[in-house]
Image (cartoon, rainbow, N blue to C red):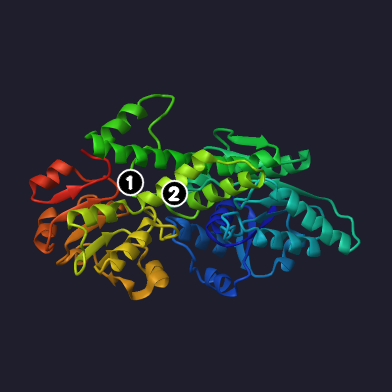
Amino acid sequence: MKIAIVGTGYVGLVTGACFSEMGIDVTCIDVVQEKIDNLKKGILPIYEPGLENIVTRNYEAGRLTFTSELASVINEVDVVFSAVGTPSDEDGSADLQYVLGVARSIGKLLNHYILVVTKSTVPVGTAEKVRKVIQDELCKRNVKIDFDVASNPEFLKEGNAIEDFMKPDRVVIGVESERAKNILECLYKPFMMNNYRIIFTDVPSAEMIKYAANSMLATRISFMNDVANLCELVGADINMVRKGIGADSRIGNKFLYSGCGYGGSCFPKDVKALIKTAAKKNYEMKVLKAVEEVNEMQKSILFEKLLKYFDNNIEGKRIALWGLSFKPETDDMRESPALVLINKIVDAGASVNVYDPIAMEECKSRIGDKVSYAKSMYDAVWEVDALLLITEWKLFRLPDWSILYKMMRHPLILDGRNIYNKQELCAKGFKYEGIGLC
């Protein structure tokens, strides 16, 4: 089987690499020629553990190829996956111009049956729009060619995407024909040798599942952050609360960690899009609106703690940030709490030193010289008045506290992910605050 994947961003490149690893002939397509040229040289546009090796191995074996021309491959493949971006529009709805652009190109070029699969996260009803665009182009050409449209949303965690794709906990596929079902079942069979985990649905349900899943996870995070903030006011400990409620089998222990807010390319965008989808149907998603509100507030929680500690005046202070990406094992800074904190700290008259093992270049491309970029985690804390832990990278988990104590001008630790032990640090002479700790 031969497939094409349009879009070489996070979803498209991981999908293409993993399919090719299973022996499938894959062509990845992107309109940005520079990205295609770099991929042929082994230079990836994203950081994801293990991805570079898989891309290089399969490119050299000829199973994975790259081009900027859909026309050069569309009539040689059986399936086209659309994995282009769906960024938030100004009103919060998903911008479908790239998805529909791919559909338009397919309609202009198609000369045999093909299965068009939407891999991008799209609102319910997008498949019908894709179908209409393709059919309209075929009508303009006065040709009759059968095709199917399916929905196959991705559930990849950045930093663990290869494992998630190769050993998925479920594969959701929305189809409208037995032919499309058989093709996709065959395509995913190599990943299901030990446990069949494909869930077939109608297309609208598949589109909704993706949004509902991300919104549920975002809801759990915001709920725990809300509870954590209350814990501080009443003298409870969020870590103990988390263990207590997580032991309930109806709740479980996943996504119950409090912190300084979620970010990334999925949760913020998808929550907004689902709220907007409901609004178009004259329905208000009250819970999700609260989820969004709590998360935006939570991104400022460390700044509020910093201000409170220094009596609402941090002018002239030097502040260190450990971590810039929205989560470990990625350089993705989209909607990262670090960006909010940097802006607030700088606007308040303080200077900022930052260190992240992967996301430094990404930060430079976003905010330039607004901060000082340290050469190491220890270099970042030299003569600072406070250290803010933003991203729980492994190398930050067990620092040499004696070195930090000597290097810092003021030994204040604000832990945005609750990875340190308060009693231990206080015994070493540090001032410590986490999120929701008594």
Callout 2, which amino acid? Asn
Q: Position of residue 300 (x, y in %)?
A: 33, 54
Q: Is residue 75 left or right of residue 380?
A: right
Label 1 neighbourhood size at 10 Å, few (<14), some (14-19), many (20+)?
many
Q: Position of residue 417 (x, y in %)?
A: 30, 47
Instruction: Identify the residue under disc 1.
Output: 259
What residue is shown at x 31% (from left), y 58% (from top)? 323
What residue is shown at x 26% (from left), y 67% (from top)? 352
Q: Is residue 93 left or right of residue 322?
A: right
132 in relation to 278, above or below: below
Helix, strand or loop at mark 1? loop
User: Furthest residue to the top?
Assistant: 249
Helix, strand or loop at mark 2? loop
The reply to whether residue 189 is in sight is no
Q: Quarter-wise, where is residue 427 in the image? A: top left
How many labels, in total?
2
Q: Nearer the viewer, residue 257 or 113?
A: 257
Label 2 neighbourhood size at 10 Å, few (<14), some (14-19), many (20+)?
some
What residue is shown at x 42% (from left), y 72% (from top)? 365
Instruction: Identify the residue under disc 2.
Output: 160
Residue 334 image label: none
Which marked residue is nearer to the observer: mark 2 or mark 1? 1
306 in relation to 382, above or below: above
